[in-house]
Amino acid sequence: MIHSDIFLEIGSQHSVCEDYIIHGYDPFQYIILSDGCSSSNNTEMGSRILCHLAKQFLKYYKGEMPIDAERMGQWIIHNAEMTARQLGLTINCLDATLIISYLYEDANTFHTIMYGDGCLAIIEKELITLLSVSYSNNAPYYLSYQIDDFRRELYEENIPVKKISRIDVSGTNIYDSYDSIFPLKHYERSTPIDENFQGLLVASDGLESFVDNSEPIQKLMPPISIVSKLTSFKNTKGEFVKRRAKKQMKEYRGQKIDHFDDLSVGVFLKD
């Protein structure tokens, strides 16, 4: 059996939490999260709109598996534009990343689709592998650029490099992949539920914003160490992620460690 739970916490340098995350079991198990851009207005609203429309897409097109990620992205952002305008918001509120991870039961596989940046950790027996998708200049490609020709063209004139890093539980960087040709394309990964599979974690890039303030010079914490702590579950019933994360955040605060960016984390865990 697969359990899921989520955790959300505002960053220490934010006055409004622009991350949002949901999970559920209908029409199949999913975790969806979005991270709004801090330099755009009302992205806390935009991230919510994107998440709930992604959920609607899964319900409407549940019979079309595996899901066409490009079609889904276009459907979500065009419906999000209409929703934002009806709420009296500018389309800049949709400047947000989007991660959708769902259980494709027919293939006994988790499928994760990432529009923009974020983190994905695969938890296996005695092994955790963290995949991090990032962009140079902290400038991820947002789905909202698809509905704004001017901003899309401006972005394409200064295309940042898309970087995919893979790090194991020891902190060793297994590889870095740099994509300067197709950085606008979404990232997809399928994770089979085999005998080694224990769980899967998805998170916003807030996972990479933990800072140790205990010394005069601030020290950025390696995100793989954060994943290891957040997934050290003693009890996997009920709100197992919230319990573990709240306890760990309390411990971190005692050590003068905090995350300056908003943090959203979702975990699938095999019983």
Image (cartoon, grey):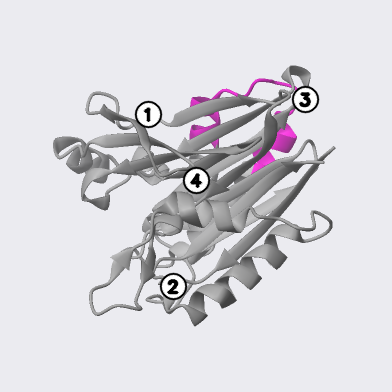
Which residue is at the front of the view, 194 or 18?
Answer: 194
> Which residue, given by chain and number where applicable, does mark 2 sit on?
258
The quarter of the rendered structure image containing the C terminus is top right
Residue corresponding to mark 1: 185
Location of residue 96 in the rendering, given as x and y in whole percent from the top left corner: 43, 52
Residue 163: percent from the left, percent from the top? 30, 36
Identified at 65% across, 20% down, the residue is 66
Sequence-first disc among 3 and 4: 4
Left or right: 188 in relation to 152: right
Q: Where is residue 259 in the image (x, y as percent from the top left)?
A: 43, 68
What is the distance, in whole Å, between disc 4 and disc 2 at their CAs? 24 Å
Identify the residue under disc 3.
Answer: 105
Q: Give the range drawn in magenta.
A: 55-75
Residue 147 lies left or right of residue 6; in this view the side is left
Q: How far apart are marks 2 and 1 (CA)?
A: 32 Å
Which corner quadrant of the image does residue 156 belong to? Answer: top left
Task: Say few, some or many: other residues with alpha carbon within 10 Å of mark 3 (under 14 / 14 to 19 / 20 or more).
Answer: few
Q: Is mark 3 on a helix, strand or loop?
A: helix
Residue contact at pointers 3 and 4, CB within 8 angstroms: no
Q: Which-is-in-front pick, marks 4 and 2? A: 2
Image: 32 above or below 219 = above
Residue at mark 3 to residue at mark 4: CA–CA distance: 22 Å
Earlier in the chain: of badge 2 and badge 1, it is 1
